[in-house]
Structures are given as C-alpha cells and as structure tokens.
Amino acid sequence: MPHWLQLMLESLPSLLWAALIFTVPLTLLSFVLGLTVGLGAALGRLFGPKPLVMLVRFYVWIFRGTPLLVQLFLIFYGLPSVGILLDAFTAALIGFTLNIGAYTSEIIRAAIGSVPKGQWEAAYSIGMTWSQAMRRTVLPQAGRVAVPPLSNTFISLVKDTSLAAAITVPEMFQAAQRIVATTYEPLILYVEAAILYLAMSSVLSALQTRLEERLNRYGGFLEARS
C-alpha cells in the first residue's frame, strides 16, 4: 500500500470524529441561530421604527464588511481584555451566528420584499392581522424565494467552520493540523481534509438541487391554478 494512502486511512477516523463532534454541530447551531437572528433583523429593518432600522443597518454593515476571521479573533482574543472570557467553541458559535445573521437578514429582507403587495392586501381583505398575514401568506412565499441563497450560505458555512481552527476549536481542520504536527506530511493531510470538505459540500449541493426541484414543481402547480 502506498505511504500516502496508508496515512490517509489511518488519519481518517480522527478527522471524521472531529467533524462529527465539532464541525457538524458548529455548522448546524450557527446556521439555525443565525437564521433566527437574520429573520429578526430583516423584520426589524422592514417594519421597525427608525432607530431599530438604523441599528440593524449598522449591524449588517459591520459583519458583512469585515473578515470573518477578524470577527472570530475579536470575540475570542479581544473580549478577554474587557473581562469577557469565552471558551473556543462558544466564541466560534457567537462569531458564526452573528456573521450568518447579517447575511441571511439581507436574503430574507429581499425575499419578503419580492412578495407582491397584492398578497398583503388579499390577506387583510379576509380579516387577517399583520402577524397572521406574515405567517400564513408572506413568509411561505418568501421562503420559496429564499431557499436557494440560504442553501448556498449553509454550504459556505460548512467550509467556513475551518476558520474555527484559528481560535483552537478542535474541528476537522485542526485535527488535520495536529496530525501534520506529528507526521510532517502537510500535503497529504490537507488534501484529505479538502476532500472531506468537498464531499460534504457535494452532498449538500445535491440535496439543495432536489429541494429546489420540489419547490419548483410546487410553485408551478400553484401558478397553473392561479
């Protein structure tokens, strides 16, 4: 067996374990929390009072305009200077959540804005309140529009979690770095890590395609009946 293949096989369990214990939970938690933050920010910017609108704009401007790695460093290494101590995983979770929240807020805001005004009027005409119209009429339609960009954001997040290695989160990429430190084979280990990230992204891309096809069929059915 070639040396490079043997090393890959021997290191694979460690990389997969790090992915299962840290990379996957960090990705899922960050995306769910970020999506929640993004929805709240989008609604605040669209329907909130002017001070809230300005606050949301500032938040989005900061987190979309600065590198994610810098944000992670500020949270993990900078906050202790003002007495806020966070463990590495929590710091990474906060950083990814706020970053994802900024991006998804713009996606959701655009998706809600794409719903025709007549849909609001139709909902109000049958006696719905604002919250009912939003929940039953607007958000379902906006969700269909938002799925593709949100899916792309989720796939990007899977790869971006490798940045958590820079603040000592023992996720998959840092597991590869630890093995490199003992084997002195960076090319082989980093290629293996890249292949694993590529495999995860490919699976998610295939699932995204299937989901979009189902939504398009459903949307076509609705359009045919309208």
Image (cartoon, grey):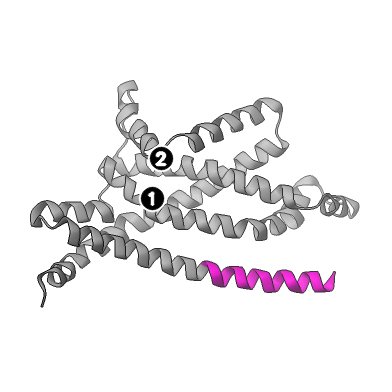
Residue 85 - label: none
Quadrant of residue 66 within the rendered picture: top left
Q: Are marks 2 and 1 in contact (CB under 8 Å)?
A: yes
Residue 217 at what x, y percent from top left? 68, 74
Question: Label 2 sits on what residue type?
Answer: Leu
Secondary structure category for the residue under label 2: helix
36 left or right of 14?
right
Above or below, 178 against 8 in this view is: above
For the image, the number of numbered tags is 2
Residue 210 at what x, y percent from top left? 56, 72
Question: Label 1 sits on what residue type?
Answer: Asp
Residue extending farthest bottom: 1
Residue receiving disc 1: 160
Instruction: Tell me the chief SS of the magenta region.
Output: helix
| Whole-number angstrom distance, CA of label 2 to CA of label 1 | 9 Å
Residue 9 at what x, y percent from top left? 17, 71
Q: Earlier in the sequence, mark 2 or mark 1?
A: 2
Answer whether residue 17 is visible to the viewer in this image: no
Q: Quadrant of the N terminus?
A: bottom left
Above or below, 51 against 17 in this view is: above
Residue receiving disc 2: 68
* Number of other residues with Cα within 10 Å of mark 1, as a class: few under 14, some 14 to 19, many 20 or more: some
Quadrant of residue 224 within the rendered picture: bottom right
Residues rendered magenta in the picture: 208-226
State the residue at coordinates (34%, 55%).
Answer: 23
State the residue at coordinates (67%, 41%).
Answer: 43
173 left or right of 139?
left
Answer whether residue 4 is visible to the viewer in this image: yes
